[in-house]
Image (cartoon, rainbow, N blue to C red):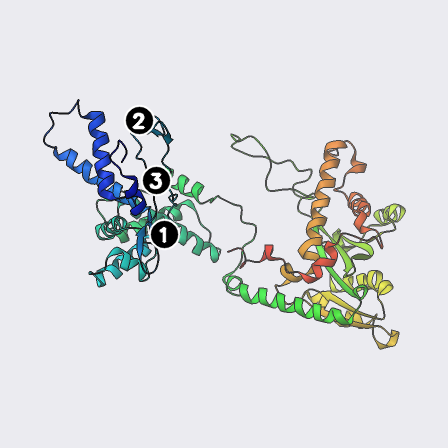
């Protein structure tokens, strides 16, 4: 037996920590440290009794960490070889009487418990209420593995029976507002701050608790929007109720059309699969946004011609094929009064028209059925193989089969398979729209921005202005991708076998 009164033989017979032995050792430590100062204390106060009860509960929780649980028995784990209680001194180790140092280390590290939802706590307490004779460990074996100990179980019972506190009610209000926000945006309803103030009032009246004081103030609204990453955005497109309801059908039709093209492509060479579509441009590319100072109340934007160049448009049309090439020239349809060039402008165009641009005009700057036939004659006939697939959208000018029979058929030994993209599926399944046209517009903006900075085109160097008729023709003739038979990026090959989910109204939510 050593000086502390602990027998080494006792360690060998029962190495597990004895709860009463631990309490006895704790009492001796407290007497040694505070016995002289509080030797006349004979009775505990009410506050001290309460603190002792809480301390005892914590003691039981810490002791539980030594319990190894399995499906049949629960036994105390073996204590370390040198089970010596730490003294409440500043040192981390307690020296023994034989001169050696011992340091207490917990044999099992305390694991961080997972957060249990309120709904799960209610389920556990309801199961416990139906079996009042069950102990906490029995409850744990019968479908409630989350219960760590008896103290926690009683705590959950108190939380459930007490009802919601103020914090939980506020969480329900915030969750209700966010769910209503998501449901409204699924159908693309236009939301304002006034809507977000009405949603919480609706839930507050439903709770019907006079003790809960809540107001949908501006500060609450700002915090709510910041916490949920909600901001005001410019509406880029208005959609009807029919379009919203048929969103799933549109996306499924686009996927079905894509699968059909992939299946057909097995019987054709990649050089035999064509796609064409129109892309509209404004003569002057403006933007609805600009970088400026935060405190600027009225934001102005400069335009060379706000009522002319910024509103008038022209059309550009390419033909691409699945192999990754652009076919023929770039086809440009300018907007001209009366739908034809004047004699002076016609002679001027003929003097500088590049070899990789085919130009025409119309009153609106858009193609008509007759101009589409002119496009087929100039752009498609010279490059069409004996057998090919031609993918177009559902525009009436493209779907007019008589326009193709004039140039293709048995009489010239050319077989054309015209595949029409289903209505409203163009943003998702049109190969040119999914990637190519977006890149084309971005490239045009970058070039025009560079001209504004380096050449100062606002009235000084008009010959380099990309907003005039001549500037438009020079702009598209300068694009590397607009030259005949120049291999482009792999994106042209990929767009024939993809669905653009960025424009899908359903996939956003």
Residue in the picture at 88% in, 51% down: 355
Q: Secondary structure at mark 3?
A: loop
Residue lying at the far bottom of the rendered structure = 410
Q: Comparing marks 3 and 2, which lies closer to the viewer?
A: 2
Q: Earlier in the sequence, mark 2 or mark 1?
A: 2
Residue in the picture at 26% in, 37% down: 6
From the image, tell me which residue sits under label 1: 176
- Label 3 – label 1 distance at C-alpha: 17 Å
Q: Is residue 444 left or right of residue 301?
A: right
Q: Is residue 154 left or right of residue 298?
A: left
What is the quadrant of residue 472 in the picture?
Answer: top right
What is the quadrant of residue 226 in the picture?
Answer: top left
- Label 3 – label 2 distance at C-alpha: 53 Å
Task: Using the rendered image of the protein, determine whether residue 489 is visible from the camera's viewpoint.
Answer: yes
Tell which of 28 and 153 is nearer to you: 28
What is the quadrant of residue 258 in the picture?
Answer: bottom right
Residue in the picture at 36% in, 36% down: 104
Q: Secondary structure at mark 2?
A: loop
Where is residue 169? Give x, y as percent.
29, 48
Where is residue 59? Give x, y as percent.
26, 41
In this rendering, the answer to whether 248 lies above or below 61 is: below
Circle 3 Cα neighbour tier, 10 Å, few/some/many (<14 / 14–19 / ≥20): few
Tell which of 24 and 483 is nearer to you: 24
Q: Are marks 3 and 2 in contact (CB under 8 Å)?
A: no
Q: Comparing marks 2 and 1, which lies closer to the viewer?
A: 2
Where is residue 62? Give x, y as percent.
30, 42
Q: Earlier in the sequence, mark 3 or mark 2?
A: 2
From the image, tell me which residue sits under label 3: 217
Quadrant where the N terminus is found in the figure: top left
Tell which of 422 and 105 is nearer to you: 105
Rendered image: mark on residue 89: 2
């Amino acid at each position: 037996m050593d000086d502390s009164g602990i027998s080494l033989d006792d360690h060998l017979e029962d190495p597990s920590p004895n709860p009463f032995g631990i309490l006895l050792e704790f009492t001796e430590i407290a007497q040694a440290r505070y016995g002289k100062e509080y030797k006349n204390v004979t009775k505990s106060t009410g506050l001290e009794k309460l603190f002792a009860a809480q301390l005892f509960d914590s003691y039981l929780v810490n002791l539980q960490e030594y319990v190894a649980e399995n499906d049949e028995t629960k036994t105390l784990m073996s204590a370390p070889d040198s089970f010596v209680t730490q003294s409440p001194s500043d040192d981390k180790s307690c020296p023994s009487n034989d001169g050696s140092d011992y340091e207490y280390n917990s044999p099992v590290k305390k694991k961080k418990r997972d957060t249990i939802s309120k709904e799960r706590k209610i389920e556990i307490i309801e199961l416990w209420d139906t079996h009042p004779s069950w102990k906490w460990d029995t409850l744990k074996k019968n479908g409630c593995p989350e219960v760590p100990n008896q103290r926690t179980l009683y705590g959950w019972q108190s939380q459930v029976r007490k009802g919601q506190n103020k914090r939980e009610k506020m969480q329900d209000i915030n969750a209700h507002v966010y769910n209503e926000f998501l449901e409204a945006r699924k159908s693309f309803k236009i939301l304002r701050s006034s809507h977000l103030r009405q949603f919480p009032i609706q839930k507050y009246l439903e709770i019907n608790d006079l003790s809960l004081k809540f107001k949908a103030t501006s500060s609450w609204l700002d915090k709510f929007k910041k916490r949920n990453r909600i901001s005001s955005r410019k509406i880029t497109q208005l959609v009807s109720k029919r379009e919203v309801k048929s969103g799933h059908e549109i996306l499924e039709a686009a996927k079905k059309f894509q699968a059909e093209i992939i299946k057909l492509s097995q019987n054709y060479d990649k050089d035999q699969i064509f796609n064409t579509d129109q892309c509209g441009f404004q003569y002057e590319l403006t933007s609805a946004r600009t970088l400026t100072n935060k405190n600027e109340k009225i934001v102005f934007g400069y335009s060379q011609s706000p009522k002319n160049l910024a509103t008038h448009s022209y059309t550009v049309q390419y033909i691409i094929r699945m192999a990754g090439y652009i076919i023929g020239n770039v086809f440009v349809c300018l907007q001209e009064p009366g739908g034809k060039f004047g004699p002076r402008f016609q002679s001027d165009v003929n003097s500088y028209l590049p070899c990789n641009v085919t130009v025409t005009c119309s009153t609106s700057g858009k193609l008509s059925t007759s101009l589409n036939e002119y496009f087929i004659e100039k752009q498609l006939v010279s490059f069409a193989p004996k057998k090919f697939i031609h993918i177009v959208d559902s525009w009436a000018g493209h779907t007019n089969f008589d326009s193709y029979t004039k140039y293709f058929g048995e009489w010239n030994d050319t077989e054309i398979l015209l595949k029409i993209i289903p209505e409203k599926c163009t943003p998702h399944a049109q190969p040119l729209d999914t990637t190519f046209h977006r890149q084309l517009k971005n490239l045009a903006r970058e070039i025009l921005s560079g001209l504004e900075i380096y050449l100062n085109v606002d009235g000084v160097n008009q010959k380099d202005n990309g907003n005039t008729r001549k500037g438009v023709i020079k702009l598209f003739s300068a694009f590397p991708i607009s030259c005949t038979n120049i291999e482009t990026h792999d994106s042209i090959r990929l767009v024939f076998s993809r669905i653009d989910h960025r424009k899908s109204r359903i996939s956003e939510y």
